[in-house]
Image (cartoon, rainbow, N blue to C red):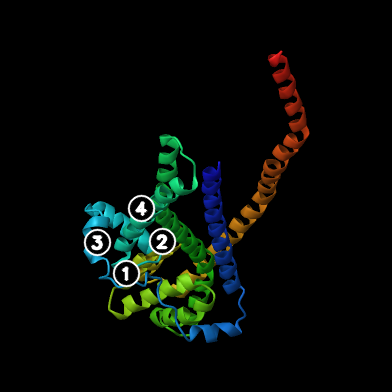
Amino acid sequence: MPVIGGVLLFFAVVLIVLGVNALLAEREFFGRRLAFPGQSHAAGASISKPASILIDDGLLKRFDSAVTPTSEVELAKIRRRLIHAGYRRPSAVRIFYASKAVLGLGLATFMAVFVPLFAPPLPLPIVSALIIVPALVGYFLPSFWIERQIEYRRQSAELGFPDLLDMLLICIEAGNSLDQASRRVAREIVAVNKVLADELNVVNDELYAGKSRPAVFRDFADRLAVPDISSFSAVLRQSDEYGVSIAETLRVYASELRNKRLMRAEEKANMMPIKLALGSMMFTIPPTMLIMAGPSLIMIIRTFAGLGGR
C-alpha cells in the first residue's frame, strides 16, 4: 500500500504541475491579448526570437546513432511535428529522442532502486508494473509535451490571425507594400501574439533572402498547421496570379475570420452548461451515494459475516 500510494502521489503531482503550467500559459496568452496599446511599442522594440531548444547543435552528435531512428520517413515526420511545435534547430530531433530515452530509463531506474528500499517484498508482477509504468510515462512525456505545444501554437495563431490581417490591411492601405507591412506588423504584434510574431519574422527573413512570395506564405501556413491560414495562403497566391487587389482580399478574408472566431466563441459558451452539469454529476452524485449507502452496506456485510460464522 505505501508503494501504491507513492505511485499515485507521483502521478497526482505530475498532473497538478501540468495543469498549473497550462493555466499559467493560458493566462499569459489572454494577458497579452488584453495588453494596453501603449505597451506594444515598448514590447516591439525587442523582437522575440523563434522558439527553439537552446542547446548546441553538435552536443548530442555522439549519441545520434543511439537515440535517433534511421528511418527517413519517421525522421521527416517527427521533424515536421517539432517545427509545428516551434522547435526549428537541427538538434531538436536528437534532443527529442534523447529526452525520451533519458526520462524512460531514469524513471525506471529510480523505481527499481527505491522500491526495494522502502517497500516490503512484493510479488514479481507488481514490481514489474511499478518499474514499467513509470518508464512508459517518461518515454511518452516528451511526445505529450510536443502535442501540447502544437495545440497551444495552433490556438494562439487561430485567435490572433484576424488581428494580424487587420494590421496588414491598415499598413497596405497606408501605402506600404506587403513586405513592408509584414515587417511593421511583426514589430507591433509581438506584444499580443508571440507565435504569429515569430512566424512573421521567419516570413520576413525568407522574403529578404529572395524566396518567392507564394512559397513563403505556403511554408508559413505549413508551419502553423491552421486551416484558416492555409486558405489565406491559397487566396494570396491566387490574388498574385490574377492581379486582384491584396487590400480587398485582406478586408474580405479578415471579416470572414472574425465571424468564424465569434461563432467558435458562441459554440464554446453554449457547451458550457452541459460540461458544468456533467462535472457536477460526476463529482457530487458518487460521494453522496457513498455517504448515504455506505453505512448500510457496512451493516449488511457485517450481518452476513455473522450469519456465516454461525
The residue at which mark 4 appears reads as 105
SS state under label 4: helix
**In the drawing, what numbered circle is on residue 63?**
3
Identify which residue is drawn at 75% across, 38% down.
Answer: 288
Gap between marks 4 and 2, in whole Å?
Answer: 40 Å
Q: CA distance from mark 4 to mark 3?
A: 15 Å
What residue type is disc 2 on? Ser
Tell me if 103 is positioned left or right of 276 in this view: left
Relative depth, front residue between 250 and 138: 138
The answer to whether any part of residue 76 appears in the image is yes
In percent of the image, x 53 and y 86: which residue is there?
Answer: 41
Q: Residue furthest top?
A: 310
Q: Amino acid at mark 1?
A: Arg
Of callouts 1 and 2, the N-terminal one: 1
Name the element at disc 1: loop
Which callout, 4 or 3, points at the residue further toward the start of the chain? 3
Q: Residue at x 32, y 75 (%)?
A: 206
* Residue 172 percent coordinates (x, y): 46, 80
Q: Residue at x 66, y 54 (%)?
A: 269
Q: In front: 83, or 209?
A: 83
Residue type of the residue flagged with mark 4? Leu
In x, y percent, where is residue 112? 40, 48
Whether the residues at callouts 4 and 3 have beta carbons within 8 Å, the answer is no
Real-space CA distance between mark 4 and mark 1, rounded to the nearest whole angstrom: 25 Å
In this view, the mark in front (2 or 3): 3
> Which residue is tagged 2?
230
Residue of label 1: 89
Element type where label 3 sits in the image? helix
Gap in Å between the C-alphas at discs 1 and 2?
Answer: 24 Å
Q: Are marks 4 and 1 in contact (CB under 8 Å)?
A: no
Between the residue at mark 1 and the residue at mark 3, the CA separation in whole angstroms equals: 17 Å
